C-alpha cells in the first residue's frame, strides 16, 4: 500500500528511543530500549550512534553504561531528530526535483510543497518535552 508520507523504521526508532531516554531518570541501555520498542538491538545501536554524533544524546560505556540526553528536552524537536536520521529536508515545489517544467501549471497543484511545509512546521513545533 502506498503512503503519501512515510517515516522510516530508523526515524521511528529514533523518535521512540529519545522519548524513552528522556523519560528515564538514569542512563538507559540499548538492550532495554530494544526490548521496549521491539527493535533489533543492532539496528537500534546504529540509530543511537547517529543521535550521539549529532549530540542529542550522550553515551557511557561499560556494564552500567547507556544513553542519556545531551540537550535539554525543550531544545530538541522531532524535526531535529528526523533530520539527524534522514538528512536535511529540502522544500521543493516539484515532486521530481526538476528546475524546468514543461507545463504552465504544476500537475500536482503544489501539494508536494504544501505537504512538505506542513510536515516541517508540525514536527518543528513538537519538542521532546511534549512527550515527557
Image (spheres, rainbow, N blue to C red):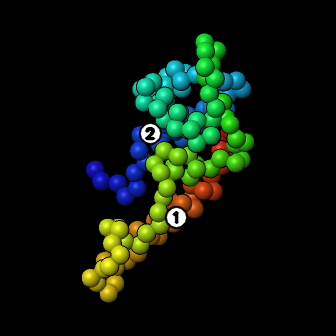
Secondary structure of the residue carrying tag 1 is helix
Marks 1, 2: nearer the viewer: 2
- The percent coordinates of residue 10 (x first, y second) are 44, 39
**Quarter of the image where the C terminus is located:** top right
| Nearer the observer, 61 or 81 | 61
Above-or-below relation of 25 to 85: above
Numbered mark located on residue 10 in the image: 2
Which residue is at the far front? Answer: 53
- Lower sequence index among marks 1 and 2: 2
- The percent coordinates of residue 59 (x first, y second) are 62, 27
- The percent coordinates of residue 115 (x first, y second) are 46, 65
- Residue 122 position by quadrant: bottom right
Residue at 32% in and 87% down: 104
Residue at 72% in and 26% down: 25
Residue at 47% in and 66% down: 91
Secondary structure of the residue carrying tag 2 is helix
- The percent coordinates of residue 17 (x first, y second) are 55, 34
User: Are the two marked residues, 1 and 2, in contact with CB atoms closer than 8 angstroms?
Assistant: no
Numbered mark located on residue 95 in the image: none
Which residue in the protein does label 1 denote?
Answer: 118
Disc 1 versus disc 2: distance between alpha carbons? 21 Å
Q: Can residue 1 be seen here? A: yes
Q: Tell me the crowding category of disc 1: few under 14, some 14 to 19, or many 20 or more residues within 10 angstroms, Cα based.
A: few
Q: Tell me the crowding category of disc 2: few under 14, some 14 to 19, or many 20 or more residues within 10 angstroms, Cα based.
A: some
Residue at 70% in and 41% down: 71
Above-or-below relation of 125 to 109: above
Which residue is at the far top? Answer: 63
Q: Can residue 16 be seen here? A: no
Above-or-below relation of 15 to 96: above
Q: Is residue 58 left or right of residue 99?
A: right
Amino acid at each position: 500500500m502506498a503512503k503519501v508520507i512515510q517515516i522510516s523504521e530508523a526515524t521511528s526508532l529514533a523518535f521512540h528511543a529519545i522519548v524513552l531516554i528522556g523519560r528515564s531518570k538514569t542512563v538507559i541501555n540499548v538492550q532495554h530500549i530494544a526490548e521496549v520498542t521491539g527493535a533489533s538491538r543492532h539496528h537500534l545501536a546504529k540509530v543511537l550512534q547517529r543521535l550521539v554524533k549529532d549530540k542529542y544524546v550522550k553515551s557511557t560505556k561499560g556494564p552500567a553504561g547507556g544513553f542519556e540526553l545531551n540537550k535539554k528536552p525543550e531544545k530538541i524537536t522531532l524535526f531535529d531528530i528526523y533530520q539527524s536520521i534522514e538528512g536535511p529536508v529540502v522544500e521543493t515545489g516539484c515532486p521530481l526535483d526538476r528546475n524546468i517544467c514543461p507545463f504552465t501549471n504544476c500537475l500536482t497543484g503544489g501539494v508536494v510543497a504544501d505537504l512538505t511545509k506542513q510536515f516541517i512546521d508540525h514536527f518543528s513545533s513538537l519538542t521532546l518535552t511534549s512527550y515527557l
